[in-house]
Image: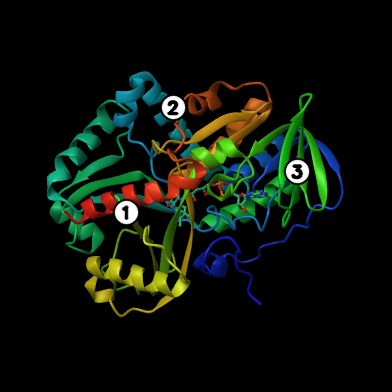
Amino acid sequence: MTYQSPISPGYSWYEDTVGERPEYAPLDGDVSTDVVIVGGGFTGLSAAVHLAKAGTNVVLIEAHRFGDGASGRNGGQLGTGQRAGAEELEAEYGFERAKALFDLAEEAKAHLLEFASVNGIDIDFRPGHLNVSHRKRDLPEYLEHAEAMRTRFNYPHITYMDAAETAERMGSTHYYGGVRDTGTGHIHPLKLVVGTARVAAEAGARLFERTKATGIATNGGKVTVTTATGTITAQKCLLAIDAYAGDLEQETASHIMPIGSFIGATVPLGDDSPVLPGGESVSDSRFVVRYFRRVKTGELLFGGREIYGVKDPNDIHIHIRRQFSEIYPELKDIRITHGWGGYVGITMPRKPFVREVMPNVISAGGYSGHGVMLSNFVGKLYAETVAGNRDRLKLFEELKIPAFPGGTRFRAPLLFLALNWYALRDRI
Ligand SMILES: Cc1cc2nc3c(=O)[nH]c(=O)nc-3n(C[C@H](O)[C@H](O)[C@H](O)COP(=O)(O)OP(=O)(O)OC[C@H]3O[C@@H](n4cnc5c(N)ncnc54)[C@H](O)[C@@H]3O)c2cc1C
C-alpha cells in the first residue's frame, strides 16, 4: 500500500515520483551522543550532514518519515534573498545587515545546488523565476526593486517585465507586469530530502524515523530527549520541528504559527502548451500567494494558500482548479492527478526564528514560506556553531521576532481574522 504522511494532507506528486525512499528504523534503547536533532526535514537533515562530516557524534529522530513535514511537500521554489524584501530589512536594520542577510541567502542558494551536485542528488533543478503583479498600481515598486537589486545589492539577475513580456513568459494576460529572476530556480524537494538523509547516514549520523520526542529536559549542561522507545542524552540539541512543533517546547510554539498551504498537480501539459514556455517558477503578488511551475516532465504544480480550512484532498482539487483557471482558462477541465498540502511555519514579522530556547538547545524554523534554501543553510550554520563559530547563525538569532499575541490558545483565531482581512484586500 502507498505510504502517506500522517501529519500533512494528501498524497503528493513528489511521493509518486521520488523513486526509492529508503526507510530508517526507529530508535530502540537509550543512547548518548554529542548532538541530538529533533525533526527530519531540511533543517535537521542538513545539520546532521554537516555535524557528522565535521566528526561530531549526532543522533537525529523524526516522528514520522523524513520529508513528511514541509520539506518533502513544498512548492520547490528557491527564491532569492530573505522572505522579507532586502529593502524592508534595510529600513529596519540598516544597509549593512540587510546586505549581509542578502549575501547569506545567496550563499544558501549556491550551497544547495553545489551540495546536490557534489553528492549526486538529482533534484530536477529548472532555472528561472517570475514574480508577477495582479495589481497595476504596484508596478512602480517592481521597477524600483529590480533597480535596487542591481545597483545596491549587487544582484544583476532581476529585470523588470512590462505587460507584454509578462504575458509572453507566462502564457497568460492575467498579470500586469513583474520581474524575472534568472539567478534562481526550482527543484523536486523530496528528492533533496531523500538524498540529504543518505549523505547524512553515509557520513556517520545515526538517523531514526518513526521516533517522536515526547519530552525535552536540561540538567547540569546535558540535554535529555525522551521518546517512547528510549532516551537520548546529549551535550547539545537542535529543535528542527518548525510548523509541526506541537507542544514539545513552548518558546518555539509561541513564535512559529502553522499555516496550511495546498498544491495540485495536473497531467503533463504537452510540448505545444503556451503555459510558461521558459520553464520558470512563478509567485504572484497576492497576500494569499499563488505559486506554480511546470516541472521537467510537463506537469503544472499549482499552489495557493487556503485560509478557509481544507477538509480533504478533494477540496484541494476544487480550490486549485478555480485558481489556475483564472490565469489559464484553457486548463479549466484538465485532469488533476494529485492534491496535497503541508504546514508552513510563519513568524509575526515573516523572518526566521532561530533562538536558544533552553541552555544548549537551539530551535530553528519559521522561514515563512521561504525555507527551501534557508532551512538547508541554517542546518549548516548550526553545525558551524557547534564547531565554535556562531557569527553567521547570530545574524538570524539577532532578528527581532515577537511571539504571536494571544498565546498558543488564542493566536489561531486572531490570526484567522487578520489573514481573512488581507485575503479580502487581494480582491480590492
Ligand atoms: C505546501 C508548502 C509549500 C511551500 N513552498 C515553498 C517554496 O516554494 N519555497 C520555499 O522556500 N519554501 C516553501 N515552503 C516552506 C518550506 O517547505 C519550509 O520552510 C521548510 O521545508 C522547513 O523545513 P524544516 O526542516 O525546518 O521543517 P519540516 O520540513 O516541516 O520538518 C519538521 C519535522 O519535524 C518533525 N517533528 C515535529 N515534532 C517532532 C517530535 N516531537 N519528534 C520528532 N520529530 C518531530 C516533523 O514530523 C517534521 O518532519 C512551503 C511549505 C509548504 C507546506
Q: What is the x, y in percent for residue 3?
A: 64, 70
- Image position of 113 (left or right of 53): left
When the figure is inspected, residue 7 is found, relative to residue 129, above or below; the finding is below
Disc 1 from disc 3: Cα separation? 39 Å
Q: Are marks 1 and 2 in contact (CB under 8 Å)?
A: no
Q: What is the x, y in percent for residue 80?
A: 38, 40
Residue sitting at x 74%, y 31%: 218
Q: Which amino acid does label 3 sit on?
A: Ala
N-terminal label among 1 and 3: 3
Rate crowding at label 3 as few (under 14), some (14 to 19) or many (20 or more) other CA atoms within 10 Å: many
Foreground pick, 64 / 254: 254
Disc 1 from disc 2: Cα separation? 24 Å
Q: Which amino acid does label 1 sit on?
A: Val
The residue under label 2 is 400
- Image position of 88 (left or right of 261): left
Q: What residue type is labelled 2?
A: Lys
The image quarter in which residue 106 lies: top left
The residue under label 1 is 288
Q: Residue 205 carries which label?
A: 3
